[in-house]
Image (tube, rainbow, N blue to C red):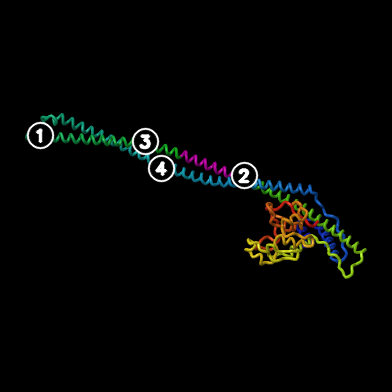
């Protein structure tokens, strides 16, 4: 990708259009001069170059906002979890309130039935008492009349009205039988009266028990309603808290975005300055070559010395291999080669039958003409100047493997990189992965 195209991308992303366009055009003209075109236009004045302290402060501010977002996210997750528990508690309390309502209704019905049963038992006992009283009065009259007539003692009327001694005896026996039956009936009535009274007492006791259960059920219903209302209030309060946390997190998230944009803006300024600096150095080098060529005789049959390789040359070489298969052990300064056997994973993908690159092989090809790199990412990490990731720029190599280096890729800027990822895949452009990445990039140019 050319410097002019990348400058256009930054212009769309919020850079300084007029300034960027001017010095990028000048860089393009300078490069054209290097390639033998028309004379170069002078590199424009330098763009803004943020200080290290400005970059550090902006990144610290972004980290603080990110930390706040993380903390609020955790708090919000806890609040939402609690809200879910409270919602479940509301549902449970509602069911308990329903149960209490049903129990209270059933207790009220049972109390009403007990009162009706007690009323019937009381009325039956009263009626039984009256019947016993009447029967007792009649029995008393009968017994008294019988004794007055001598029915038990052989009264005169019994004998006078009888036609024979047998009839007198028969009448005496009859009177005795009738009197006995009267007395037996009276006993039965008295027994019934006692039973009715007992039933009446039991019914009154049942009313007391039923009324007590009704009162307890009503109290339980009231308590269940209050518990349900308390749960509803707690849920509403927690929902309000979760909403507040969500709004607070959103506000801090927006602040984080602004801080990140500020960091990105300063980094873009720094990157443009570094590119300007590289263009300026190239301009000075070309001026020195031009001056040397003017004073030295031209070699017969020879050609001018090739221009020194640049970051864009390195990136162009790497980008030219997009889509080439991954092949473990593949790649050299001339391009992709057959992979080699590893007697393991790579063999299972048939890398030894593929023409392509592995991660370090792609770097060897990209940096050919700049430096001869060994075919091992661990050694490539030691091949240039190390710069903190916070200062990485286009054309730097990135490495992974805090417990032992296992991968390398070429940084393209704007958070993107080109890599030969792994067996079964192809050379690709992808966002930078920060998991397990080493804290330093390696710079071979600039």
Please, what secondary structure does the residue beneath circle 2 have? helix
Q: Which residue is mark 4?
A: 109
**Residue 427 in view (yes/no):** no
Which of disc 1 and disc 2 is earlier in sequence?
Answer: 1
- Between circles 4 and 3, the one closer to the viewer is 3
Task: Tell me the residue that label 1 is attached to.
Answer: 169
State how far apart marks 2 and 4 are (Cα). Answer: 44 Å
Other-residue count near label 3 (Cα within 10 Å), few / some / many at <14 / 14–19 / ≥20: some
SS at mark 1 in the image? helix
Magenta stretch: give its range: 218-242
Determine which residue is flagged by label 3.
205
Name of the residue lying farthest toward the right: 295
Looking at marks 3 and 1 on the same chain, the residue that comes earlier in the sequence is marked by 1
Please check the rendered image and state whether residue 223 is part of the magenta-colored stretch, yes or no: yes
Mark 4–mark 3 CB contact (< 8 Å): no
Q: Earlier in the sequence, mark 3 or mark 2?
A: 3
* Badge 4 or badge 1: first in the primary sequence: 4
Residue at coordinates 11% horizontally, 35% vertically from top-left? Answer: 170
Q: Is residue 334 left or right of residue 45?
A: left
Disc 4 or 3, which lies upstream in sequence?
Answer: 4
């Amino acid at each position: 990708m050319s410097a002019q195209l990348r400058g256009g991308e930054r212009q769309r992303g919020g850079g300084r259009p007029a300034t960027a366009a001017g010095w990028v055009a000048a860089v393009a003209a300078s490069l054209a001069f290097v390639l033998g075109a028309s004379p170069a236009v002078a590199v424009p004045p330098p763009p803004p170059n943020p200080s290290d302290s400005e970059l550090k402060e902006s990144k610290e501010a972004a980290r603080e906002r990110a930390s706040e977002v993380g903390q609020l996210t955790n708090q919000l997750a806890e609040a939402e979890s609690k809200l879910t528990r409270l919602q479940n508690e509301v549902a449970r309390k509602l069911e308990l309130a329903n149960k209490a309502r049903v129990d209270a209704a059933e207790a009220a019905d049972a109390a009403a039935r007990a009162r009706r049963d007690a009323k019937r038992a009381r009325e039956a006992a009263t009626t039984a008492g009256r019947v016993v009283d009447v029967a007792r009065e009649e029995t008393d009259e009968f017994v008294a009349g019988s004794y007055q007539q001598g029915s038990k003692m052989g009264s005169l009327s019994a004998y006078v009205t009888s036609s024979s001694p047998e009839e007198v005896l028969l009448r005496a026996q009859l009177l005795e039988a009738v009197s006995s039956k009267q007395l037996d009936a009276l006993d039965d009535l008295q027994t019934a009266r006692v039973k009715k009274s007992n039933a009446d007492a039991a019914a009154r006791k049942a009313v007391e028990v039923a009324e007590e259960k009704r009162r307890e059920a009503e109290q339980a219903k009231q308590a269940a309603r209050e518990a349900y209302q308390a749960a509803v209030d707690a849920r509403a309060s927690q929902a309000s808290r979760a909403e507040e946390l969500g709004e607070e997190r959103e506000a801090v998230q927006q602040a984080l975005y602004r801080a990140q944009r500020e960091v990105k803006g300063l980094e873009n300024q720094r990157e443009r300055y570094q590119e300007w600096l590289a263009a300026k150095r190239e301009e000075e080098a070309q001026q020195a070559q031009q001056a040397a060529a003017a004073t030295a005789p031209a070699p017969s049959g020879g050609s001018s010395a090739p221009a020194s390789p640049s970051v864009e040359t390195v990136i162009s070489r790497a980008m030219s291999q997009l889509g080439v298969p991954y092949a473990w052990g593949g790649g050299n300064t001339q391009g992709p080669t057959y992979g080699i056997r590893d007697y393991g994973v790579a063999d299972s993908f048939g890398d030894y039958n593929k023409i392509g690159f592995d991660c370090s092989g792609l770097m060897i090809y990209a940096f050919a003409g700049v430096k001869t790199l060994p075919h091992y990412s661990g050694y490539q990490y030691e091949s240039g100047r190390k710069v903190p990731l916070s200062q990485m720029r286009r054309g730097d190599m990135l490495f992974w493997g805090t417990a032992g280096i296992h991968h390398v890729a070429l940084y393209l800027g704007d958070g993107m990189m080109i890599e030969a990822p792994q067996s079964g895949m192809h050379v690709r452009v992808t966002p930078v992965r920060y998991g397990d990445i080493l804290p330093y990039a390696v710079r071979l140019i600039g």
